[in-house]
Amino acid sequence: MRAGIFIVALIVSTWAGLVSAKAPAASAGAHSTPAALSELRERALGDPLAMRLLESLTSEIGARQAGSEKFVRARDWAIKNLQALGFQNVHTEPFTLNAWTRVEERAQIVAPYPQKLAIIGLGGTTPTPAGGLDGEIVLFRKYAALLEAPTGSLSGKIAVVTEPMAPGLAGYAALGKARRQGPNEAAKRGAIAYLVRSLGVGSTRLPHTGFMSQDAPTVPAAALSAPDAELLERIVDRGTPVRIHLELASSVHPAQSWNTVGEIPGATAETVLMGAHLDSWDVGTGADDDGAGVAIALAAARLAGETRLRRTVRVVLFGGEEIGIAGPAYVQYNAKNLKGIVIAGEADAGSEPAVEARLPGSGAQDPALADLPTALGPLGVHWGSERSSDGGPDIEPMNDSGVPGLEVMQRMENYFRWHHTEDDTLDKVVPGELSQNVATWALLLRVMADRSVAFQTQTPARPK
């Protein structure tokens, strides 16, 4: 079913009052009473919009890498759906990028035991020479061991890091430098190429791609599937030198991307911002990362703002999160207006259930928010036992400029099984879990936009 068929029916009755410029301003808190929040929560849990939007995005667009023609189609999809859902001031904010395009990739052991390896080029990698390259590997079971290798010690060799990622977001963050900075560190030591065990969990032979730091693409670099990383370890343990043939072909061209914005006008210019990123990697269909976040943001904002609130609710669908440029582009484009954003958060952790909502500092203990544990409790979501580290990857540049960050933590037990792989597809999303996220964000957006609460300035806690 295409998006336009179901959207019209959903918005006719709920948005008539919202889009009227003559709608009266609501008194602070009038639409976030305990009874109103309870009713909102139950309706959100039964609302099919998020799943329908996600089905539409993944079926009609699929993978949508920033700078690609498919992302242009995704941008148009977002504009159409924002407008159909009654959002106002729908517009795009352009920025430029160097778009990297994957062409062809392969790797194999050539000695001592010839066989194919499952790899995927890291985003932005430099290509190998025509026909590929051959080299003996130097294997490091820990990324720290690579960093301890002296300059020149890898001359003419292929550096291979096989350290497995610990489960969850903490494990991903801890080992992230092995992917982002690993190619550069290997090049400093003379390596001609770099392979890293995928940042993911599970044992499938589908490798995980991902972004490298801008200063990192100095040698060809790819991710190995977990079974193939372990295969190399076993062969190395036999004491025989291992040689690999690697071919990575890609291209780079100047391109444009866009952050796509829509608003639900409030009675004041103060703004509560919710983000998600519209772009994905070029593998899979971007269902969990971050089609789920896009669907959650649109559905939650629609529900939260179906009555005119004190503050404006703004949805931003970022157009380059995977390569780290959409958040900074938003700050640059809106530099003069950031002070009007009272709080900002992003849905970018897939579709598994939300488990906790956090604010900066001691903000969650504000007496004006004392009823949130009761509202969120039936969803299994804890309120404010820890402070937020930021509002999300695209929100972090705003946090660095003083905008408070709203952080919603999710379970993420399976997220890193298919994250950045061909397996990031719609079948991984459980409709009831997606709806639980919609309900969580709808409650938070309603309260943040309906009540006159001053949030504490963000103090960044995530390591840079």
Image (spheres, rainbow, N blue to C red):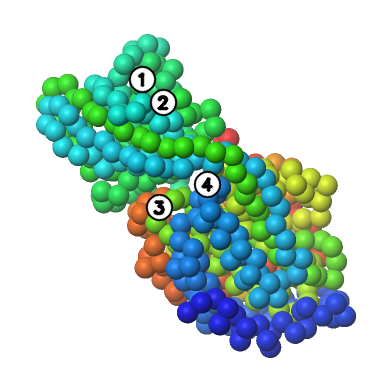
Q: Are marks 2 and 1 in contact (CB under 8 Å)?
A: yes
Q: Position of residue 169 (x, y in %)?
A: 45, 48
Q: Nearer the viewer, residue 359 or 47?
A: 47
The kind of secondary structure element at disc 2 is loop
Q: At 26% from the left edge and 42% from the top edge, which residue is drawn?
A: 118
**Residue highlighted by disc 1:** 191
Rounded to the nearest angstrom, the CA distance separating label 4 from label 3 is 12 Å
**Residue highlighted by disc 3:** 283
Instruction: Say which label, 2 or 3, has the lower sequence index.
Output: 2
**Residue highlighted by disc 4:** 322
Q: Quick check: 5 above or below 197? A: below
Q: Quick check: 358 above or below 208? A: below
- Eye-nearest disc, 4 or 3: 3
The kind of secondary structure element at disc 3 is loop
Amino acid bearing label 3: Val
Q: At 70% from the left edge and 75% from the top edge, which residue is drawn?
A: 86
Rounded to the nearest angstrom, the CA distance separating label 2 from label 4 is 20 Å
Q: Are marks 3 and 1 in contact (CB under 8 Å)?
A: no
User: Is 125 placed left or right of 40 in the picture?
Assistant: left
Res. 152 in view? yes
